[in-house]
Image: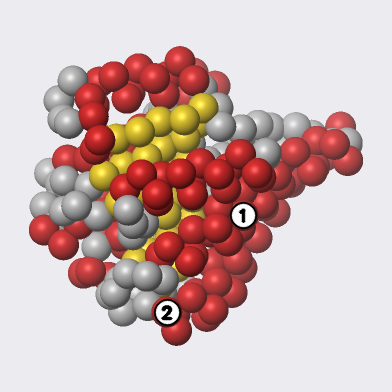
Amino acid sequence: MTALYSCLRDKAVFITGGATGIGATMVRTFVQQGCYVAFIDLNAEAGAALLAELQAELPAERASFAAVDVTDVQALQQAIDAAAQRFGRLDVLVNNVANDQRMPTAQVTPANWRQCHAVNLDAAFFATQVALPFLQQQASASVINFSSVVAVTGKVDMAGYVTAKAGLIGLTKALAREAGAHGVRVNAVLPGWVRTERQLNSWFTPEQQQRWLEDSALKRFIQPEDVANLALFLASEQSVMITGQAIQIDGGISLSD
């Protein structure tokens, strides 16, 4: 069950990587709270389908989608600026976009490394950079950066991803200090293995699922809704004194590889 936060009604939210998985669940969840939601994704087909689904149920001005490659900094920042102008405000930025491709360390090229960081770390910085002037106009605003539990546990064949996600924790702490004077909270969410369609199709094999349950204190899988509910709390005024934090949502996992 999702709590209803009356303080979120009519707030404007921008979500990167919002067309599928956790991102799509967050888009739906924030819309259900009565928010205005703009989301971007590289997957134009999935994004358009989600937008059509939303607009079948609510006024068209409540949601917008743009197909954007977040490694194109100019396009990313223009999309955020356009959303803020469209809604007349910006209250919440969710830096959710990620790419968790695996690659053995010996095979990583400089181009692979830079691409990994461009998606998983750089996009969050440049999105926040352009969003902050809008967020600072609100009495209470929030930036939510999506890191990962692997930033603190490590993961085989994911050196670039782990490094980028650890960098997001550092970025969160740095920006929290800077933005706090203007009433903007900045926090990081560190999910464990979330049972999304992509993970089930790509990495989360039956064997991995069994191991996850064995190593988890809570004997259930993490669902996208669980993560979305944490994002709602961090966006709401119920978290008004929480900033600079890296919050794990992993079921108490002890898995390290």
Which amino acid is tagged 1?
Phe
Relative to 33, 70 lies left or right: right
Which residue is denoted by mark 1 in the rendering? 126
- The residue nearer to you, when weighing 228 against 153, is 228
Nearer to me, 1 or 119:
119
Residue lying at 25% horizontally and 20% vertically, measured from the top left: 53
- Tell me if 257 is positioned left or right of 210 in this view: right
Q: Position of residue 39 (x, y in %)?
A: 41, 37
Residue pointed to by mark 2: 182
- Label 2 crowd (10 A; few <14 / some 14-19 / many >=20): some
Determine the residue positioned at 46% across, 44% down. 82
Q: Above or below — where is 233 with respect to 44?
A: below
Of all residues shown, which one is farthest toward the bottom? 181
Q: Position of residue 73 (x, y in %)?
A: 66, 45
Among numbered discs 2 and 1, the one appearing first in the sequence? 1
At 40% from the left and 51% from the top, the residue drawn is 84
**Mark 2: amino acid:** His
- Please identify the quarter of the rendering in which residue 182 is found: bottom left
- The x, y position of residue 217, in whole percent, is 34, 52
Which secondary structure, mark 1?
helix
